Structures are given as C-alpha cells and as structure tokens.
Amino acid sequence: MDSFLTSFLAGLPLYVLFIIICVFLYVLGKGADILVEEAVALSVRWGVPTVLIGATIVSLGTTFPEMAVSVMSAIRGNPGLALGNAVGSIIADTGLILGLAAIMKPLPLRKEIVNRQGWIQVASGILLVLACFPWGNPGQVFTVGGNLPQWMGFVFVGLLVAYIYFSIRWSRNGQAPEEAGVLENSDKNSNTWVVFFKLLFGLALILVSSQILIPSVEETAYRLKVPDAIIAATLVALGTSLPELVTAITSVRRGHGELAVGNVIGADILNVLFVAGIAASVTPVGLEATAYFFRFLFPAMLLLLIVFRIGIFVSKTHLTRPFGVIMLAIYAGVTVLSYFLGVDIH
C-alpha cells in the first residue's frame, strides 16, 4: 500500500500535490474536531473522566499506526526497527507533543487519575528496559545489547488487557464537575453508541488523512529540493506522531487539555504494551534491542518520563508552560544528539 501510494503521488503534477495537501489538512482538522468533541461527550455519558478516555480509547486509536508499522517490521525481519518505532514514539509523544501542548496552554491535571496512570506510564517504560536487558550476560549491554523475547510480548499483551480493564473500573466514579456541563452543548437524545461511532469516524479521518498527507508532503519537499536531512528530521518524526499531535493541539484549542494529557500518557503505555508487545509476540526471535538502545534511546525515554512525573508532582492543578518548555527542550536536545550519534529515534 505504501509503495503504491508513493508511486501514485510521484506521477502527479506539483499543483495537484498542493491541492491534496490542502484537502487532507482540512480533513485532518475536521477529524480532530470530531474526535475531541465526541470523546468529551462520551466521557460524560459513561461517567468516565475525559483524561481516561484519552488514555484508553483515543490512545488505542492514535497508536494503531505505530503498532501496524512495528508488526510489519517484525514480520519482515527488521525487529530493531519495530522496537525503535515504539521507543521513538514515546520520546516524541512525551517531549514534543506534551511539551507543545503545555506551552500553548497550561494543561489541567486530575491528580488522582493522572498520578495513577502516570505511575503506570513510568513503570511501563522501566519494564520495557528490564525486559530487553541481557540478564544472562549483563556485560554485553553496552556493546551487543539485548532482546525483547516473544514470550514477554505475550506478557505485555496480557498486561494491556489488564490496564484497560482496571483503568475503566478504577475511574467510573461519576462525572467530574468541570465536565458536567458538556452535554448541554450536545444532543442529549443521541444514542451513546452513535457518539462512540462518531468518535471512531473522527479517528478514522485522522489516521487516513495522516497516511496520505505525510507522503504527499514528502514528495512535494523532494520536488522543491528540500535537503534530505531536513525531511528526515521533520517529516519522518511528524509522520509517526501526527495523530497524537493533532489530537493534542485540537484538545487544547477547544479547552479540553485533560484529553491531551490522557492521550499522551495512554500512548506511552500502549507503545510498550500494545506496539512492542504485539510486535514481539508475532516473531519467534523477539525484538532486537541493540547497544544504542541502552546507550541512548532508553535513557532518553526514561529521562522524559521522569521529568513528566516531576512536573505532575510539583504542579498543583495544571501542568505549566515552564515544564512544557523543559520537555520540548529535552526533546530537541535528544533529536540533535541522535543525528550526531547516527541514531534513529523515530
């Protein structure tokens, strides 16, 4: 599918590519508007806080492209790329997306939920590192690396089911006060399942438009002779994170920053349990974690997760702009350093 789309776009005139980009930017924005509106409405109808909807249903949808890429990479014999995609997405989601969202507007924190989900977020990152560690020969960790075995992939998938189940069970405590008025602006008579399918429709618009938009922009950049290094540093990163990015920006713009927080936390957890877990479970050799993972990628991932936890700990009701600046600066530093070291973080 990717090769067909790339070949198709390569044969189009430049002005048609510009039209495609404009059309799908519009579709992307409309999809995000629908997704955010219906996610908030659904959270009220189900009595589940919006941050939880972001951390489960929305995150499952926005991480689906990463899962598909990682699974296909593992099946095609490139397990290192499969794991790198999961780890790179955690780095981008936490540093780039959450950082930008917090800079746009301080993000509201439901402490009792964000603390619980946030600790699961950090624990998932630590678990991934421990699962990949070469316990049989620890001396080779910085020279040869390790491996995420297939059996651990099945464990991750089991933990994914438990995470979703317990998240919903823990959080069905009724509507949050700040969410109680949402239904006044929506159709109170509409069926809950209609709202749910509208949410899925908005998510589908985001995913489909992202898959078309990124190669269209890449082809246009090549035609305009934009250097390969710039394309790799911007468009490739944007391609893996665009669903989460547009969801976060739209959530903040529409006054539902808690959805952005939940989406990032959930996406980080799911990149471990859902993306890496399923990718590892479909290949007998597991996922390769080269020495660069332990030298650079894992430390960068854990640094961002820990900084986010510190931000939650010291914040009162909102994650403030200074922490957004810190996280974005760390992401920028990691990205620049990755090019000097020749490491692909996306």
Image (spheres, rainbow, N blue to C red):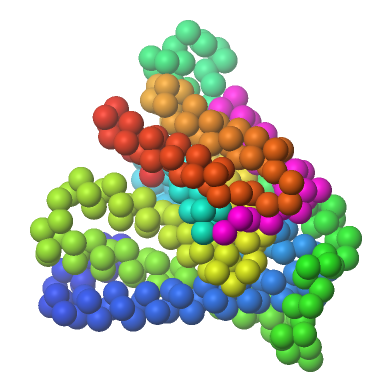
Residue 197 or residue 186, whichever sits in front: 186
Left or right? Give the position of 14 relative to 280: left
Give yes or no for residue 207 being in the magenta stretch: no
Q: Position of residue 233 (x, y in %)?
A: 29, 47
The answer, for residue 15, to whether it is visible in the render is yes
Q: Which residue is found at the position 83% from the left and 56% from the top?
A: 171
Highlighted magenta segment, given as a residue range: 105-131
Q: Is residue 83 above or below residue 219?
A: above
Left or right? Give the position of 112 relative to 156: right
Quarter holding the N terminus is bottom left
Q: Is residue 180 above or below residue 3?
A: below
Q: Is residue 230 above or below residue 135?
A: below
Instruction: Please tell me in which quadrant of the rendered image residue 28 appears.
Output: bottom left
> Outermost residue, right direction?
173
Q: Which residue is found at the position 38% from the left and 40% from the top?
A: 332
Left or right? Give the position of 196 relative to 128: right
The answer, for residue 266, to whether it is visible in the render is no
Q: Position of residue 279 (x, y in %)?
A: 50, 44
Q: Main secondary structure of the magenta part?
A: helix
Q: Position of residue 234 (x, y in %)?
A: 30, 52
Quarter holding the C terminus is top left
Instruction: Please tell me in which quadrant of the rendered image residue 251 appears.
Output: bottom right
Residue 129 or residue 244, whichever sits in front: 244
Instruction: Please tell me in which quadrant of the rendered image residue 157 appears.
Output: top right
Q: Which residue is found at the position 37% from the left and 74% from the top?
A: 25
Q: Which residue is found at the position 64% from the left and 49% from the top?
A: 319
> Outermost residue, top direction?
139
